[in-house]
Every structure is written in C-alpha cells, then in structure tokens.
Amino acid sequence: MRGTRRRDPRQGPTRPPEGSLKLTIAEFIGKWYLPLYVDVEPLKAARAIRSNCAALRRLIGELPLKALEGKDPVDIVKRAYLGHALSTRNRMLSRVRHMTNWARGRDALDVKASPFHRSGVRISTKHEVQRDRRISEVEERALLAACEKLDEPSFHSKLTWKEVNDIRARAAEGESQKSIGEDYGIGSALCSQIVRNRIWNPAMYVPLTCGQEMRDRIIGALETGCRQGEMQKLQNADIDWHSHEIKIAKAHTKASVARRIPFDSEGRLGEILQRRRFVGGPKGFVFGDATGAHLGDFNRLWREVKLIANGVQPEYVKRGGYLTAGCKAKLKELDLHWHDLRHECASRWLEGGLDVREIQILLGHAKLEITQRYLNITDVGVVRSMREYWGRQRATGRAHA
C-alpha cells in the first residue's frame, strides 16, 4: 500500500517505554538499579551502596523517575543532609548522579537528561574537611584495657569471677546444676556452659571470649594500616613466615593492587600472628572469631569498647537492641571511627621516619596525593623537617650568628 513505511528488517521490534512516567524512584531502585547493577556487578562497596539506596528511597522514593532529570531530588538530598559533613552529602549526591546516568543508558526507562553537568549541579570536594583524628598512647591503652573487660562474666551477666568459680566448685562436689542456677538466678543452659568450661575459661581460647579477638583487631589495625575489609579477609595462608610479610590479595584491596606489609616477628603483631597461626588451619581467618571462622561485622563490639574505655557502661533499649540515647551521644562526642586507626598507623609511620612514597605503597593508595591528604603532611612531616633543620643550624653555629 502506498504511503506506508515499512519497518527496517535490520532493526528488532521496538517496544514502548515501560511506563517510565509512572515508575517511581523507589520502584526504579528496587526493580532496576539494585537487581541489575548492584547485585550482579563485582562491587567492593556493594554494602555501602545498598545503604545509600535505602536512604534515598526514604528521601526521594515517592518522586517519579523522570524527576531525576531535574534538580528536585538534588535539593531534597541537600536539605536532608544540611547538618552533616560535606563529604557525607557529596557521597549521597554522587549516588544520585550515578543512578541518573545509569538510567539514561536504558532506553526502556526514558530518562534523557541529567542535572549534573558543568553549568548545572556540580559536586565539589574542595571544601571537604579531612579527618585529623589522632589516637594518643593513653587512649590506645584505654581501648586495649576495655577489650579485657569484654571477657569478664559481669559484662555479660550479673556474675563475677568468684561466683563463676564457686559454681564450678559446687558442681564438682555433685550438687545439681538446677539448684545452683536457682541460687545465682541464672538459667540451666548458662549454668551448664559454665560448668563444662564452654565459656569464661581463661585456660582455653574458646568462643564467647570476644575481648581477646577485639584486642587483636585493634593492634592489627594500628600495626598494618589495613582497611577493615582487608583485615577481615586476611587468612593464615596469607602470612609469609619466611620473609615476615603479610600478603594482601588484589581482590581484597580497594585499588585492586596486591601489596605486602612487613611485620616485626618479635613485636606485638608478630605475637598475635603466631598465636593465631594454626587456628582454623591455613584457611582460618587471622582476625576472625576464636575458631578462625570469618567474622563479617564487629561494629557492636567496637562501639562497646569505645564506651567502656571512656568510663561508660553500654546500655541498650529492651526492644530492638539499640544503644540508648545517652550512649549514642557519648559516641558522637568521642568521634572515633575504626578507619581512624588506619590514619593513626600511617601518621606513626611518617613520624618514625618512613618516606611518603613508602607509606603510599604500604597503604595501597593509587595516588600519592591521597597519601599526602591522608597524613596531613603540614602537621607531621613539616614539623619533623623543621626540627631536623634547626638541628643542622645549631650544629653549624648559624642559629646564634
């Protein structure tokens, strides 16, 4: 028939956009972004991305997907994070930008533009405040001492070490565990574990003595400068006892570059590695639990250690297991993050005389500029250089000329 246009056989059948005008941002995140990008790509920060997406669902989830072409979602995110650190706000805006660009690459979503461009919305990191939180030797000793308290029976129940020993002595004399438990107000299951030395047994390295493992992790972070994820994936097979080096696999690093970190076999880190050497076999995790199994999360223990180190007993609400408002306020006042241990390690290396480029290799940074910002060179390196300069001036007699 004349006047009709025939379809090009080289092109596949076209399908209309799947209701992009009706699709909300929350539905886009749940049905497209998470299952087709976050869940299938080998992303090292997948957990953080999911957390960001959950926050964005609450903030801009009800907006239509087309709203990503404009500045409304950006303005909402900026207002929501007005009182937060600039780096936190920029991180959320970067996630919005990535979702927008990802949606633009899918024809079925019909997102044609992005507000992030040179003359539009720009994410500036120039004024982001670099953390310069230092950990003094006094604070370090307090943190390590707090780890020992995690293994005290009184931390997990109302029992003391004397009462634990009394329970075992009475059970050894033949008294029933039921009557012992009634006298001390504990259940039969807990009484049985105490009597059988399953818990609170200093003579054995057993589960539920988490303070020792937490102490090992803090020392490991201060001695190796590893990221938390790198430490959690470190296995006994990664320890080279011939060269006394720790091998960080390429797949476990942020920059996808393998590296080796020397350790002092006679130092405190060497003692930990030696003690954990055969726990769980070659595949046992050095900084895992007491059996060498992988430990995915120790954030609760870390919060408890920080509170105990500063004289605050951790308290939780009955429902949900969340810290009370007073404990949360104290943690915010302390402003101590696990990543600060990595910063502290690098700063101590610099103060000890290591070159910045050597520190860059040990930390696994892709660029030297990152290491320089990381270490706050103006506060550490320049002061050391000036002291050396003054020493040379005094040696030559120019200081009093």
Image (cartoon, rainbow, N blue to C red):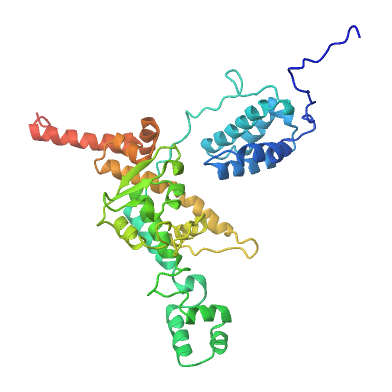
Residue found farthest to the front: 9
The single residue placed furthest to the top in the displayed view is: 2
Would residue 204 appear left or right of 52 to someone viewing this image? left
What is the tally of numbered marks visible in this picture? Answer: 0
Residue at coordinates 62% horizontally, 37% vertically from top-left? 37
Note whether 266 is above or below 337 in the view shown: below
Vertical order, 228 against 151 (above or below): above
Which quadrant of the structure image shows residue 13?
A: top right
The N terminus lies in quadrant: top right
What's the residue at 53%, 81% (across, down)? 191
Q: Position of residue 374 (x, y in %)?
A: 39, 37
Which residue is most to the bottom? 174
* Residue 21 in the image, given as x and y percentages of width and height: 79, 29
Any part of residue 168 in sight = yes
* Residue 71 seen in render: no
Residue reaching furthest to the right: 1
Name the foreground residue: 350 vs 244.
244
Point out residue 331 in the picture as x, y percentages from the top left corner.
50, 53
On the rendered image, what quadrant is the C terminus found in? top left
Which residue is pictured at 71% across the width and 25% down the height?
107
Left/right of residue 72 with respect to residue 259 in the rendered view = right
Q: Position of residue 233 (x, y in %)?
A: 45, 51
Is 244 drawn above or below residue 146 in the view shown? above
Work out whether residue 229 or residue 392 is closer to the camera in this orientation and state it: 229
Query: Which sits in the foreground, 194 or 304?
Result: 194
